[in-house]
Amino acid sequence: MPLDPANDRRPPITPQLALRVAGVGVFAFVLFGIVFFRLWYLQVLDGDKYLAQARDNRVRIERIAAPRGQIVDASNLPMVDNKKATVVSLDPASIPAPMRVQIAAYGQKAGARAARKKGQQGPRVPVPQASGDLLLRYQRLGNVLQLGVKTINQRVVDSIVQVPYANIRIKTGVPAAQRDYIQERHERFPGVTVEQVYVRTYPNRTMAAQLLGTVGQITQKQLDAKKGYDGAVGGTDVGQTGLEAQYDKFLRGTDGRYRIEVNAAGERRQAATAVQPKAGQQLKLTLRQDIQAAGETALKTAGHGLPGAFVALNPTDGAIYAMGSSPSYDPRDAAPGRYSTNAAYASKFLNASTDHPLIDRADESAYPTGSIFKPITALAALSAGVTTPGQTFNDTGCFQTGARKQIDVSCNTGKKANGTINMVDALRVSSDVYFYNLGKQMYLKSGLPLQSWAHKLGVARRTGVDLPNESAGSVPSPAQVRKINRWELACRKKRKVASCGIGSTGHESWNPGDMTNFAVGQGGLQATPLQMAVAYSTIINSGRVPTPHLGLETQDSRGIVQPLDFPSQRKVTIKPEWRQAIMDGLYGAANASGGTSKQVFDSGWPRSRFPVYGKTGTAERPPNGDQSWYVAYSYDKTNPSATPIVVVCTIERGGFGADAAAPAARLILSKWFGITPKLVRGSSNDR
Amino acid sequence: MSAATTPLRDIDDAPPRERSRPQGMALPFDLVLVLGVLGLAACSLVAIKSSTADDIAGDPQYYVKRQAVFFAVGGLISLAMIKLDYSRLRVARWWVFGFLMASIFAVKLIGTTAKGAQRSVPLGPFQFQASELGKVLIVIVLAAFAAERGRRLQERDTTARIMLLALIPAAFVMVQPDLGSSLVYGAIAFAILYFAGTPARHFLALFALGAIAISIVLVAAPAAGVQVLHGYQKERLTSFLHPSADPGNAGYQQNQSLIAIGSGQKTGRGAHATQTQFNFLPEHHTDFINAVVGERWGFVGAALVLSLYALLIWRALRILTMAKDLFGALVAGGIVAMLLFQVFVNVGMTLGIMPITGIPLPLMSYGGSSVISTLLAIGLLQSIYVQGRSSAAMKGRIMGH
């Protein structure tokens, strides 16, 4: 059949077409049905949920930073203050998502690398670098802020790794000209915000830095932990170390809020109700700036600039007058963002060559204490009944601690024989042999009396001072020996080496030698200077254990003062005659002839008005040199209850106690009593 | 005799209602269809006006004014089409196809790039989007080709050629990239084959081929290192299945669209509509206009708009049955498919049951090319209606005498 155009002009509606049209009709009906059903589901059944989400979308909460509370000393002199500063920061949401993903991956890799052992860390993980548009934005920002692109990139990377959603601080303390330039050209700096924040200032720079601690943006960990950080959001400054961390909930205050309606670009449509920021409370310390300054200077001059620590506190109530650790640092430098790279930060604060300025040696470092431990041994021996205050002992210069004649012999320094001495004499001349004997006798007693007395007086237990990271220390004991054996053997097995160096053989036993060493503050003893101050205070208090503290009271913005409460008061039974014997011994050591620190207080110290009770210590701490220790207790005889003070000084590698630590303690006492300071070194070579 | 040569049946076998109606009362066009279009135009203008007041600083009426112009121009074209003898288009089908391909190439050569896609040619102050007009043109070309082969519609050859004719422009549009329009072309081709009476086995074969093609595009080609679809296209095509998995990126629009529509509830949030007004939902005046309606006027508003579309589809199907010839019927069928597919995919996209493909909502979404092209199609429907009715009336008159 030839195709004829006219032929296909057939009547359009065939049954087949009708059927197909009907099919499409049904199909369309079903489609519309689906859409209607879905619409009904979304809008009528689930509408409330979406309405809530829409409201969430619209409202942004903008923070008004609350100034942190001041920290002042006992006479209201500022230790930490605030100043307003302009901060330029970058909204992490304005960094392209692929870059953020890259940075997160870098963070994980770098974290995993840092967790591996040194030497097995493998190659350094390359820091993601900005490119293209982002690089251009960094350059533009860097030109204004006078920062390199690399620095900006590093800050962005560090911040996103640490706190992914917090604003990235690019520069703090931006001059007005730069601030205005950016604000006037807002659209040329996408994601950049300029805000006023309070930054911490430290009028005394490095003074008491470890106590005061640092402030930094809240970390992801802290955000997740929630506890103690109620109401803190990403980007809030919180105390990270020291008192700033300990009293964060008082100091931080409550940020104010603007509720702002925004559009999708985050531009303000209208500002709604504002909650005024509530300033943090002022924290008043028991610290005295003059004593603190004198202490830090004394530690440096008397201690030959070596690392060390000192504590000066009131033995009656535990109020700390001064507490310092050398070397120190400027907390401003330790704040995040001061150093562009982690390596630069480490070279200033963390590497071995820095002597670890961040550590507060007064309460975070536990050392062997040497002879300043002897009063504790004396108390234990008295209580265990192995001696009495009057009982004498013939000090021949050396002592047989164990069965083997050649090896198990310990001697006084220079094998000096002190002859027949009682407890008071032994403390005065610091006879090692006398206390070796007490140690050996207590070894034979059941119940480990020396360990339990050390513990009672606060050694190997936290003092409860109001600082984070306090170290507990430890005392040697059979259990400790067993533990060390276990560690050594487990370590050998795991690492498949002949010796790990934790314990020498892995099969050590608890020997008389361990006890005799412990009796003179050596062996496995690890105690902090603060613990020793508490132990001496307890003896001075006839058994009442004070809780050392730095905080005194808080004061809110309305001026309402709230005293901080430090409930102490464990009691230890110390018989008056025991206390008397020890105090006599300590007095003799600082005043009587043959006393280890007599020379230090000989020239110009008004003994009649300010009696000094003191004990030197010289701790062996291989592979380091001997550590110099001194504990002093004094008061003003004209007003004994008002001015008691216990001072503990220690100087790492400082040599004999009378040579470094005791002169430092004298300088601190001089300041406390208002006596002309004088550096007098003693020459006693007794430990 | 094959089924292709179904015996001709007289139109009088079916008693059309029109014929019983007095001639004098008849309008020269389908009034219901016109009312439906006017209703949608009104909805479109109101929705655009309310959602774009803040989009162009200093000119809150910018979009609504332009959209009104588009409706006016499109309306005039539509009116002109009523008088047109659409059969001429059938004769000119190769010219139409040539124009279609030329416009697509023109976009490639002199087109402007917006949001990463080269889809339009600047025409004075307006952007002419060739792929939109192409939707109507491809209806004409395919319908004409099928009508031309009216007696060979059962042949495999015909089906293959029609598909080829549709796939060539679809492929070029897809690389613009404009995935949505190319999908519309495909839907139109299927509809025309369907209404032309292509046997079911051809469809089955086409579906099988399609399934193979899709698996090549999505699985085999990426495995061999050749990316046919852009990453974002694949993401969009799949992200509607889990919109909240990645609300920041691929699922963002869909999520915001759901929030907008859902928050409208029964009667809408009116002036408190924040999703679209504060720009949480981008493209709210174009592809996501349905979300504006849903948020501002709630279920009531959205249902009204949907009903108007149902009305349109119904009238178009009715016109299909009234067409005086196969060409007219197929054109109407193609237009039904074009409207139905776009409405369902677009609305489904805003409701989170369809992937985001960049298909506008005909007559609602802001955009001159889409509005004018759709009104052109409506004009064609009117022309088919008018001629179908007059031919029926003529026959009726002849028979009646």
Image (cartoon, coloured by chain):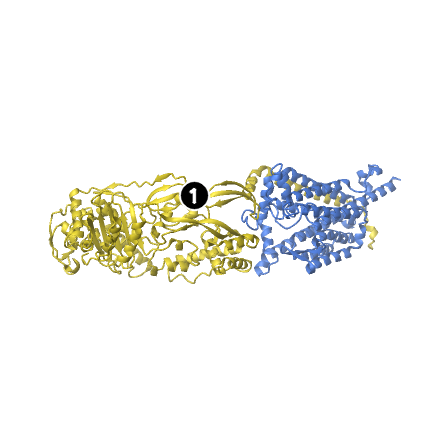
Chain colours: A yellow, B blue
Report the front residue among B6 and A254: A254
Q: How many discs mark residues in the rendered view?
A: 1
On-image quarter of the N terminus of chain A: bottom right
Q: A499 or A106: nearer the eye?
A: A106
Q: Name the element at disc 1.
A: loop
Image quarter of residue A30: top right
Between A345 and A388, the one lying in front of the other is A345
Q: Position of residue B34 (x, y in %)?
A: 75, 42
Q: Callout 1: 10 Å neighbours few (<14), some, many (20+)?
A: many
- Residue type of the residue flagged with mark 1: Ala
In depth, the one of B8 and A489 nearer the eye is: A489
For this view, does A266 lie left or right of residue A447? Answer: right
Residue A437 location (% of width, % of height): 15, 52
Left or right: where A612 falls relative to A566: left
Task: Describe residue A553's horizontal placement relative to residue A336 as left or right.
Answer: left
Q: Which residue is mark 1?
A: A279
Q: Is residue A460 something one can see in this rendering? A: no
**Chain letter for the residue marked with disc 1 in the picture:** A
Visible residue check, residue B111: yes
Q: Position of residue A390 (x, y in %)?
A: 11, 47
Residue farthest toward the right in the current orientation of the protein: B401
Residue A77 lies, in percent from the top left, at 35, 47
Q: Quadrant of the C terminus of chain A?
A: bottom left
